[in-house]
Image (cartoon, rainbow, N blue to C red):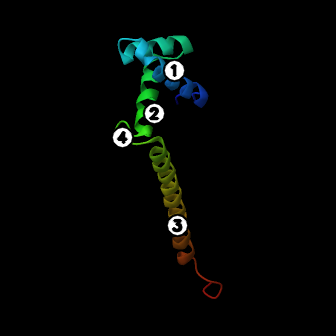
Amino acid sequence: MPKSIDPQLRARCVRLVREHQQEYPTVTAAVTAVARQEGVSRESVRRWLAQAEVDDGARPGITSEESAEVKRLKSENRRLREDNEILRRASIFFAGEPGPRGR
């Protein structure tokens, strides 16, 4: 499981790339410089910047909010399926068991 990155670090990296992008010949050069300065991988900063652009509407894709909602719904769906399976098995168990008069 990937380690959790501090949201403040992520936001700071994105802000630094955006603020200093004009000082570098390419976005990749700015990303590399910020990644080195903050002690994170270049690929992480690149992905954070891309996701920030999606969240801002500057790039097509699934926003962070939409992704979190899908994750929440999948978890809820899985839990409800498990609950339904438990109830199905319980109803089969109790339907097959003779009542107090049938013993």
Q: Which label's residue is closer to the chain start, 4 or 1?
A: 1
From the viewer's perspective, is residue 26 above or below residue 18? Answer: above
Closer to viewer: mark 1 or mark 2: 1
Check residue 61 in the rendering and tell me which mark sits there, or answer none.
4
Q: Residue at x 45, y 33 (%)?
A: 52
Real-space CA distance between mark 4 and mark 1, rounded to the nearest whole angstrom: 23 Å
78 vs 32, nearest the viewer: 32
Residue furthest out toward the right = 100
Q: Residue at x 46, y 23 (%)?
A: 18
Real-space CA distance between mark 4 and mark 3, rounded to the nearest whole angstrom: 41 Å
Q: Label 4 sits on what residue type? A: Gly
Q: Secondary structure at mark 3?
A: helix
Q: Secondary structure at mark 1?
A: helix
The residue that mark 1 highlights is 16
Q: Label 2 sits on what residue type? A: Ala
The residue that mark 3 highlights is 89
Q: Are marks 2 and 3 in contact (CB under 8 Å)?
A: no
The residue that mark 2 highlights is 52
Q: Position of residue 89 (x, y in %)?
A: 52, 66
Q: Residue at x 58, y 31 (%)?
A: 7
Q: Is residue 81 left or right of residue 94?
A: left
Real-space CA distance between mark 3 and mark 1, rounded to the nearest whole angstrom: 56 Å
Q: Secondary structure at mark 4?
A: loop
Category of crowding for the residue at label 4, using alpha-carbon neighbours closer than 10 angstroms: few (below 14), some (14–19), many (at least 20): few
Real-space CA distance between mark 2 and mark 3, rounded to the nearest whole angstrom: 46 Å
> Which quarter of the image is occupied by the C terminus?
bottom right
Closer to viewer: mark 2 or mark 4: 2
